[in-house]
Image (cartoon, coloured by chain):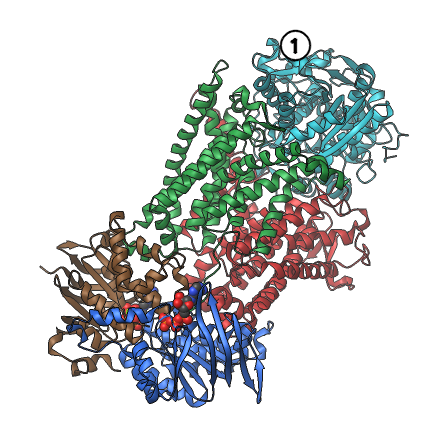
Amino acid sequence: MYHTLLNSPVSAETQMLLPTVETMVGVLYFGLFAISFDFISGYTGYLSFGHAVFYGTGAYTVILIANGKLPLLGPGTPFMLSLLVGGLIAVVLAILVGLVSFRLSGVYFAMITLGFAQVFYVFVRGWDYVATNPRDGPAVGPSHAEGFQIGAPGIDQLSLSIGVLTGDEVALLESTLSGTEVSYYMIGLVVLACYFAMQRVIHSPFGRVMIAIRENEERAVAIGYNTYLYKLGAFAISGFFAAVAGGLFAGFKRSASPENSFYFLVTGDALLASIIGGFGTLAGSLYGHLFDETVREFLSKAGQGGGLLPYLRALLGQETLDATLVGDTTIGGLIDLLLNGHASLYVGLVFVLFVLYVPDGLLGTLRERLGGTFAEALPAKLWGDSE
Amino acid sequence: MLRTQGLTREFGGLTAVDSVDFELDAELCSLIGPNGAGKTTFFNLLTGTLSPTEGTVELRRDGAWQDITDASPHETASKGIHRSYQVTNVFPNSTVLENVRVAEQAHSDDATTFWRNVDHYDEFTERAHEILDRVGLSHRAEDLASTLSHGAKRKLEVAIALAGDPAILLLDEPNAGVSSESVDEIRALIEAVAEDYPVLLVEHNMDIVMGVSDRVVVLHQGAVIADGPPAEVRANPDVQSAYLGGYEPGSLDDDTTAAGSDRDSEEGTA
Amino acid sequence: MSLLELDGVHTYYGDSHILEGVDLAVEKGEVVALAGRNGVGKTTTLRTILQLTPPREGSITFRDESLVGLETHEVASRGLGWIPEDRRIFGQLTVEENLRAAIPDPDDVRDGLRLAFDSFPILEERRGQDAGTLSGGQQQMLAIARGLVGDNDLLLVDEPSEGLAPQIVADVAEALSKASEDVTMLLVEQNLPLALDLADRFYILDKGRVVDDGETAAVTADDERFRRYLSA
Amino acid sequence: VSDDSSMTEQDDSDGGTTDSGTNGESGGSGSAQTVSIGVLQPRAGDLKYYGDQSLWGFLSGLAYKGDTDPPTDPGSGEITITAGDTEYRLLIRDTEFSADTAQTAATNLVENEDVDMLAGCASSAVASRVVTTVVNQAQIPIMLGPAASADITSNSDTCSDLVYRASENTAMDARSGGKYVARETDVSSVYLFGADYSFGRAVVNNYRDVLEAEGVDIVGERFVEQGYAEWEGLLDNAEEAGAEGVVGGFTVATLPAMFNAFLSGEYSYRVFGGFATRITNSVVGGTMQSVLGEPLTAEKIRDSQLGPFTTRYHWNQYDNPINDAFVDSYTSAYGVVPDLFSAGTFTGASAIHQAVQESGSTEGSDIADALKGMTVTDTPKGENGYTFQEYNNQARSAMTVANPIPTTDEWADSWGAAIMPGDPLARISADETTIPQDSDQMGCSL
Amino acid sequence: MIVEALAEFLTLGELGGVIVNGLAKSALYVMIASGLTLIFGLMGVLNFAHGSLTMVGAYLGGLLMVVTVTGGTAPLTRLGLFFLAIAVVFALLTVLGGAIETTIIRPLYDRPPIYQILLTFGLTLVIEEVVRIVLGVYDLQPLSDWQAALATKPQFLREPVALGPVSAGWMSLFQILLGTITVVGIWAFLTKTRYGLYIRAGSEDTEMASALGIDVRQVFTVVFALGIGLAGAAGTLLMWDPTWGASVPLAAETLLPAFIVVIVGGLGTFRGTVVAALVVGMADAVTTWWFQNVIEFTGLPELVLFLVLVVTLIVRPQGLFGVEEVGGH
Ligand SMILES: Nc1ncnc2c1ncn2[C@@H]1O[C@H](COP(=O)(O)OP(=O)(O)OP(=O)(O)O)[C@@H](O)[C@H]1O
Ligand SMILES: Nc1ncnc2c1ncn2[C@@H]1O[C@H](COP(=O)(O)OP(=O)(O)OP(=O)(O)O)[C@@H](O)[C@H]1O
Ligand SMILES: [Mg+2]
Ligand SMILES: [Mg+2]
């Protein structure tokens, strides 16, 4: 599908618009993180502004294990087990943070979780144990040169390695899937499983209590729910999946840094994803992040083969570009000045327009338009062939 | 079933509930008193929403008294003390059915189940429908609670309190804002549930209070000033002056300024 | 010309058609009661007049001026006051601040507060208390007082006696009756005897339409006309 | 992967002065042999200038070898430069100064564009990330630069026979400047400051080693967050500790605030360290103007006790035909003089071409083999100015020490900062600048 | 070691210096937080663009100073021009704030606050990139402080002044003065005009407030605009302080502290904000001293604000002066 488009007459346009497979892998694991964020924030109404801590925990755990830096777990520990360990550490962390934070609500909750997260962030940045330069973050070293395997641990036939450079290639009928593509499907598998697990929770009695808490916590207490425990439980579940997402990220990228895992702006990205996708819709977050990434990539892929800038350059032709406007500014120069490296400007504009004109988010709006049952089935359907 | 001893609650210098000794049996007991007498505060103390400055609250379960003074609201609720709120307090963006269903679910062991779909728990939904039938809201089951009219929300209040097989029902002005024709429905409803559960009712509509109650307790400035069968309480001169001496149709035609200033002094620090 | 006139007013919440052509008029100096079962649209009528829920069709004129299309605060500043059914006091403001917020002219604050405190002395005692911590009935008194202190020509009153002890109901009745000497009123009240007592005329609303109206002097609370529309 | 011609942009640099006419269509199947190099530099954003001068230096190096003028700035994308019978297809990628972006871009270049080797990386964090996750993983060589942390070529984690660096590093700054200060000035006690990340730590460590070895007292050492601004107290501490000299291992994010506090206070010590790029000079020059008052004079600067500073390379420090040609062609192509990083990347390019010629191969691994131990013929520091050391593949080259002076009229246009390096006070020969093989700081032995 | 350091810390000179420094920091925190308090604390609107607007204020103020001040301008004239610049920037940003509110913030009041985050975050991206583009045209470094603007500061503000045994900077005193003026001004606005009451009423129940004849929209516009104006004025003040200075990262550097001050103080109370600014400023000054003299952990200065935040919220979940949630009836 992807390839056919690239070879078609509109290939320049396609190239400009379509995210690369590698971006899509990022959409998957970060989308999972955004989903886990939406799980707690969108359903209980408690904005977990420090969620990046769990993502970072998952990522660092995977790398530390691979580098043989976690006691008892050698570099050879199966990736799936590392994910689980990262998830469990995050659960413990979530419970510790939650014990204090859930005494608060509203913005205060958001801010105290942010506060905790920043404390962890500063700590991890200064912790020499994790990497020689903790500020730059750890990368998977020679002790684990092969790719991380997703699948049934121990059974090689049922496992495939992920990573652009380290992933397995798989021959399928006429074409072969590259390492990146294999990663896409394997990580997609894990993400899908996690999504269904969270979906399950939301539709369970427990999930209904989460919604009741969002709707009116005082009344939820008054009808007999110990909301504190429910919130803690939801937070722990959410933290677990956030850590799995972080683990997938580290497994694919083979590196992490405090800035791209523990930093509060990482939570910010998840927040954006879930609002764009539709707050409190779970799967929406994934689409939200896909949208966010596509826009960013479209605007910033300057000169890397796709994106708006090179497309404009090619479209307008050299003569138009060299034409002068005022003084010695050429059209090309102006385009460069306004576009090159200023993707954020346009991303920002897109956000503003989004909030004003698509208030319920992508999935929220879709559900509104299409009504209940179909919309329920839709995410799963779209997911299957979202590439 | 439920008793308090010396129950007191102060807000700053104000004693909202003043050493109340009270016991509720399997009966329909009404709690009346002027505005600000401390009725809602008393409810809040019984349910653990507020903790008392002094005194105890005890609940009888399996024949033994159990101290629940320091229990939190969700604990009292799960011990079966259910309440409705004076100011509507529901889950606004959930459906009417879900409002009741989630309350019903609170009293099962399945509430913490996170791996099974709610649709597997038909019994909650069925019970919720029954309760909605009972309060006359079944035709609005699928509407969002926020779109109900005021009167309908009052009914939903009661429905939520009824969910989950209460041991004791505390109803805080279930009739406020309910139109006169529905008042009769609600009155019938109260009488019916009182057959099944002990009920403590706060109500300003004297027709209902006098009509349905087995017993009436009058609170004034936080303290109990009368306690007895309706007829006796109605006749009590203290109650008359503190509370009942109210609006009579036609009274507006006479100039009643004098009566007004009279009451001022009694209102005092309610 | 009447002080307030509604003509063929249609109002919707989203897709649901609530008012299906309400016609009514209030003359200056009158107290008019609006009765009807739960959910027939009484509150909606008041909200429509205030342009909180603007009508989709029909005209609303106040002192010969159309209110349709105005902002709520513009409607209010033309002399319409509202005592809403669910009180809607500002819970985080003190009692006094609640009242002050309702008095547009700073010079009138003293008189306004006096009027409120005279009608409901308990409010004076609690003037510094956060309104959210008042008892339900006290909040209701505050809501009524807040309606009274504004410099209004027409008061839209929604269920003023709800949640009040019989004694206070009498106070309220008295305060409203006293206020009605200066202010015209459109009153929604479930306590029919009280409503009929206060009002000069009444309208009965059913399914979003006015189905009956008349002089209160001619009827009693258990009149057939009421029973037909007010009982199930 | 689909045909490149449909997706690569036409580079907009066909100004007629370059002989890059064969780009695109040839697809590598022309008569000439083709080496494709993935170039990783910041091409946009706040630190674009780092990328500019590094890339321009690299392009100038290849152009010099091909005897043409350097092409106008290609931004990012693809550009072809021919030198001799070899065509260099440069795939230039914007790293946004971020390790993540750089890693992604490098991975992509290796995986999808089949580049023969990589070049670039403007910060140490970016460099070590690319080396660990891409170079080592894909076994593809890289010509690093201008990332300057000495660590990369002295730490066994990152140094390897795939990692070459012609660009000068922080240890070279310290060894040249530190020795000069220790030997030629009366400074006998020094307080060290550094930003708390790889670059700053490297600077401080390198200075400490050198100065201690020269018998200078290190009276204190402090790391601060990058961008730290409350300098007064810290500078006071240095004063109290009896420092006669202070070194700041910072970049443009921190230096202005430090210099501002230093110039505003009355401190008895002097501040020395490395001479930075034009943007830092322009900011620091601005600071000097604002504190010392305009116009700046050589005297005011001298009295301010700022300097001397080591320079890795500045255009006016070398007088030889190659440098002259470099400065001329660079200035006319880009409107500014070559800067701190330019010589290193120029030499990197020059070395690559020399390696291709010597090995006669365009394979990355052959090029890497040829680079091993190579003495680079054409460099801005003169003929044979750089030599790759066998034990760590870091090139050694000469350094100079200079004082800041007000920018002379000659360079006012093409330098553009208020201060510039003056004539060299000293030259440190190549064999004294780098960490020797037997030093205990050298963790790399290839 | 610690004991010695403590003894030194407690000497009059050191402690006094720390206190003056702390007051100056508090003054700056109050300046950057007060606009946010108005908007966030009273209206409940989370304005993530606050920091960016402070940054714009810093550049605008700097620009005004750079064009009006020449090398020969007398110190007092410079001060005068500076006050003028503050006034002009305040006016410009107030207008800008009004425009922002009426066009894009207004549709959001009846939506959950989360949308305001997305919108104002988008705004931040736009503002910062526009600033970068403009700086690019004039070849200014976005990352480091704008030196030309710093240079317009009169010489005496760089100099120390002795207050008994305590040595402080004139700049600190100047900042304390401006902070005090701001606090008094806002306090007067909130208590002497009816706006304070209207804002609080309006943010609690818009419908009811408008039914009382309050033009809630206009009130919100005015308050939002003033909040933005204050952000800008604060920026102009920061432009002269080398610790902050006009630079693009100033946006992020001011946003977090501003949020933290507002939260620590408790939503909706200006008094709380002032006290919180004092607490945070003092904590900052104290840790700065400890960091410079004893503790080597580089993350320390960065952690202070968050530690103050976390500790305050643990002890007082509703902030120092925030109102506890009202129980149900
Ligand atoms: N926000 C809303 N959205 C949708 N429907 C609404 C909304 N508010 C009210 N309704 C519906 O409009 C109808 C009229 O409501 P309204 O509040 O006007 O009734 P009312 O006559 O005042 O009743 P009550 O005596 O119970 O207060 C009701 O059926 C109610 O469910
Ligand atoms: N949190 C509080 N802080 C201060 N005073 C309070 C608080 N809560 C209640 N009060 C006061 O306590 C008194 C009792 O209030 P309560 O709500 O119990 O009255 P009530 O009997 O339910 O009245 P009503 O019939 O009007 O609902 C009132 O005067 C009220 O103002
Ligand atoms: Mg009550
Ligand atoms: Mg109503």
Q: Is residue B1 visible?
A: yes
Of residues C98 and C35, the one drawn nearer to the viewer in this rendering: C98
Q: Colour of chain C?
A: brown
> Which quarter of the image is occupied by the N terminus of chain C?
bottom left
Chain identity for the colour red used in the image: A
Q: Colour of chain E?
A: green
Q: Image height check: is A133 above or below E313?
A: above
Of residues B74 and E191, the one drawn nearer to the viewer in this rendering: E191
Chain identity for the colour blue used in the image: B
Badge 1 is on which residue?
Answer: D299
Of residues E67 and E200, the one drawn nearer to the viewer in this rendering: E200
Q: Residue furthest left?
A: C1
Of residues B72 and E246, the one drawn nearer to the viewer in this rendering: B72
Q: Residue furthest right?
A: D438
Inspect the image, locate mark 1, and give the three-letter code of the amino acid beneath it. Glu
Chain identity for the colour cyan used in the image: D
Residue D363: % across, % down: 77, 34
